[in-house]
Image (cartoon, rainbow, N blue to C red):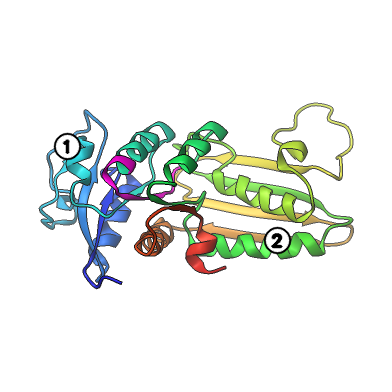
């Protein structure tokens, strides 16, 4: 395996997550910032990607995909579905690998990503946090053991700017629990309750969504039985965990020419 620094490009370079990723790349001994992308019209275009850190990287933020990806081995993308799909097409054409932390994809979008992954390696996960992915494994174990007599609810909270609900992480948690119970989440999920709903159907998995302030991301799965409750939670106080998990995914891709992977493969779970 190459010992040269991994050449990483970052999409959404002037956003909250983009800046966290750039800072993580700059701090990593085995990675180097090789490109920085942002949307056309962004006031950050033309500026050095690390100027906000008081540093000079020599990497200029650009909306030109060919320019931004020309020196990169892998792109890390936490943007919007439409932007990620445009980046995906460019990565496929240029032979750049891709770490996707974007959420809110439709089934058709996911099929498009899977098709592109036959030509370049992709890691896609609803949450890049190592802790969250450990929680997903714990949920599988809990759901198998608590498969009778427990009502299951997924509660998530995020900042006021998040545009999709429930979060991709919440949906992933619901999917893990449903699969462990032999159910299909599409058939048993309840996404809202209002008015006279009647008694709770014990076969359902409920979702509750909170949006407000600057909440980075809180997720809890509640198993409510008679006389006891089990709660499995993950609370993020910053985006550092997402950035570090993304770098682990980027390093993992160095050993793969093509294929679609999740954090389960990255972390060896």
Vertical relation: 173 (above or below) 4? above
Element assignment for label 2: helix
Please name the residue shown 19% across and 34% down the image: 43
In the image, the segment drawn in magenta is 92-102
Residue 82's mark?
none
Q: Is residue 18 left or right of residue 235?
A: left
Q: Quadrant of residue 67?
A: top left
Q: Is residue 114 left or right of residue 230?
A: left
The residue lying at 30 percent from left, 61 percent from top is 24
User: Percent from the top left, x then y, of residue 175?
Assistant: 67, 48
Residue tagged 1: 45
Residue 263 higher or lower than 188, as above or below: below
Q: Which residue is mark 2?
A: 140
Q: Nearer the viewer, residue 19 or 125?
A: 125
Q: Residues within 10 Å of mark 2 (few under 14, many from 20)?
A: some
User: Of residues 49 and 90, which is closer to you in this image?
Assistant: 90
Q: Please provide percent x and percent y for residue 250.
A: 36, 59
Which is nearer the eye, 62 or 115? 115
Is residue 77 something that shows in the picture? yes
Q: Position of residue 130 (x, y in %)?
A: 49, 64
Determine the image quadrant of residue 224. bottom right
Q: Secondary structure at mark 1?
A: loop
Q: Considering the image in quadrants, where does the C terminus appear? A: bottom right
The alpha-carbon separation of the residues under discs 1 and 2 comes to 44 Å
């Amino acid at each position: 395996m190459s010992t040269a620094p991994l050449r990483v490009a970052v999409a959404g370079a002037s956003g909250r997550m983009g800046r966290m990723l750039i800072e993580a790349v700059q701090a990593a001994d085995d990675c180097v910032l090789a490109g920085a992308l942002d949307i056309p019209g962004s006031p950050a275009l033309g500026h050095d990607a690390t100027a906000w850190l008081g540093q000079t990287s020599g990497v200029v933020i650009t909306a030109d995909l060919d320019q931004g990806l020309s020196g990169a081995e892998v792109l890390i993308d936490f943007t919007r579905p439409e932007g990620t799909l445009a980046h995906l097409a460019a990565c496929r054409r240029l032979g750049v690998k891709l770490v996707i932390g974007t959420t809110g994809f439709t089934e058709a979008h996911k099929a498009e990503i899977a098709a592109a992954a036959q030509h370049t390696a992709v890691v896609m996960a609803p949450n890049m946090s190592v802790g969250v992915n450990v929680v997903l494994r714990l949920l599988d174990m809990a759901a198998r053991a608590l498969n009778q007599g427990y009502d299951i609810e997924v509660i998530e909270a995020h900042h006021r700017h998040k545009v999709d609900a429930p979060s991709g992480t919440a949906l992933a948690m619901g999917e893990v629990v449903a699969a462990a119970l032999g159910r299909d989440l599409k058939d048993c999920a309840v996404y809202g309750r209002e008015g006279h709903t009647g008694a709770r159907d014990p076969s359902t998995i409920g979702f509750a969504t909170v949006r407000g302030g600057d909440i980075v991301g809180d997720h809890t799965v509640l198993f409510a039985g008679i006389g006891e409750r089990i709660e499995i939670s993950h609370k993020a106080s910053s985006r550092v965990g997402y950035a570090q998990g993304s770098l682990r995914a980027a390093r993992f891709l160095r050993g793969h020419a093509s294929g679609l992977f999740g954090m389960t493969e990255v972390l060896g779970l």
